[in-house]
Image (tube, rainbow, N blue to C red):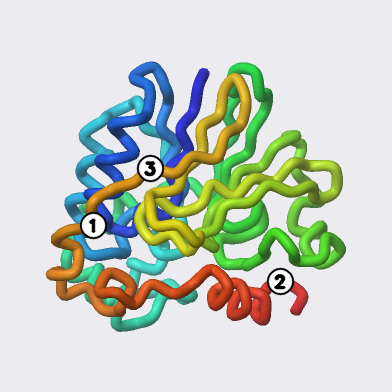
């Protein structure tokens, strides 16, 4: 099995389409959560659903929080707007996805995919977060590799003897260079960045400034997330 890990699409069809054009036809697509919360929620979701059994899914915090009874991190105006763009069936589909999934990847071995950490879908940690603060979240993991997303910035590090790889974000990246960020697994592990044309995203009434020239710098996000990282 070869795997393309596509995390944090965030309702961005141009970015998603650009990545899908680069994914080998024989690869399994692992959708790592937070698929819909962006300018075009239904369109991004249905592009992936149309690929059928080729796609494996896990749930992110912004997928779970579409259920009005759930609590979490997404700003209320954002999650409320996204909820209004989706059908009840689409919301139920996203909410019902598993929190984690293990796959055996050719040349890589046993890989655990989760959105934030194996413990939950909200904890924040970065490449530089001290290991002793993050290690408890990975204490019960048996796989040798864990793939995460959530913070929208790619990295690879060791935590308690486990290789932890952040796939980055397809649709709302905070890495320095614009593009759609994702991860290719098999026979190695490769961080990928795919350029795309964001034209049209700024016309969506999606709340927030990211798609209207308000994209923060990696340094700004790192400072903010660092102050809110697990154990801080």
Q: What residue is disc 2 on? A: 230
Q: What residue is disc 3 on? A: 194
Query: Alpha carbon of mark 3 to alpha carbon of mark 1: how far?
Result: 12 Å
Rendered image quadrant of residue 128: bottom right
| Left or right of 86 on screen, residue 213 | right
Please provide percent x and percent y for residue 154. 57, 52
Mark 3 vs 2: CB contact within 8 A: no
User: Element type at marker 3?
Assistant: strand
Mark 1 Cα shell of 10 Å, populated few (<14), some (14-19), many (≥20): some
User: Element type at marker 1?
Assistant: loop
Q: What residue is disc 1 on? A: 198
Residue at horizontal 59 percent and vertical 23 percent from the top: 105
Earlier-in-chain disc, 1 versus 2: 1
Q: Which mark is residue 136?
A: none
Which marked residue is nearer to the observer: mark 1 or mark 2? 1
Please provide percent x and percent y for residue 106. 60, 17
Closer to the camera in the image, 161 or 184: 184
Query: Alpha carbon of mark 1 to alpha carbon of mark 2: how far?
Result: 33 Å
- In the image, is residue 79 above or below residue 171? below
| Left or right of 97 on screen, residue 224 | right
User: Element type at marker 2?
Assistant: loop
Closer to the camera in the image, 14 or 196: 196
Please provide percent x and percent y for residue 185. 55, 29
Closer to the camera in the image, 222 or 9: 222
């Amino acid at each position: 099995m070869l795997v393309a890990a596509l995390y944090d699409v965030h309702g961005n069809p141009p970015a998603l389409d650009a990545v899908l054009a680069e994914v080998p036809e024989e690869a399994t697509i692992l959708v790592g959560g937070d698929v819909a919360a962006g300018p075009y929620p239904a369109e991004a979701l249905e592009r992936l659903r149309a690929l059928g059994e080729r796609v494996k899914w896990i749930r992110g915090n912004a997928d779970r929080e579409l259920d009005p009874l759930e609590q979490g991190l997404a700003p209320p105006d954002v999650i409320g707007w996204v909820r209004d763009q989706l059908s009840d069936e689409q919301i139920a589909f996203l909410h019902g996805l598993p929190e984690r999934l293990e796959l055996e990847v050719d040349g890589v071995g046993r890989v655990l995919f989760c959105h934030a950490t194996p413990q939950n879908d909200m904890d924040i940690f970065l490449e530089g977060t001290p290991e002793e603060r993050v290690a408890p979240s990975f204490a019960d993991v048996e796989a040798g590799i864990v793939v995460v997303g959530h913070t929208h910035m790619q990295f690879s590090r060791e935590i308690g003897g486990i290789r932890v790889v952040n796939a980055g974000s397809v649709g709302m990246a905070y890495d320095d260079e614009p593009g759609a960020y994702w991860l290719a697994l098999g026979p190695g592990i490769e961080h990928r960045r795919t350029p795309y044309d964001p034209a049209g995203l700024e016309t969506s009434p999606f709340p927030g400034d990211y798609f209207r020239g308000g994209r923060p710098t990696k340094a700004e996000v790192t400072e903010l997330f660092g102050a809110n990282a697990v154990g801080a």
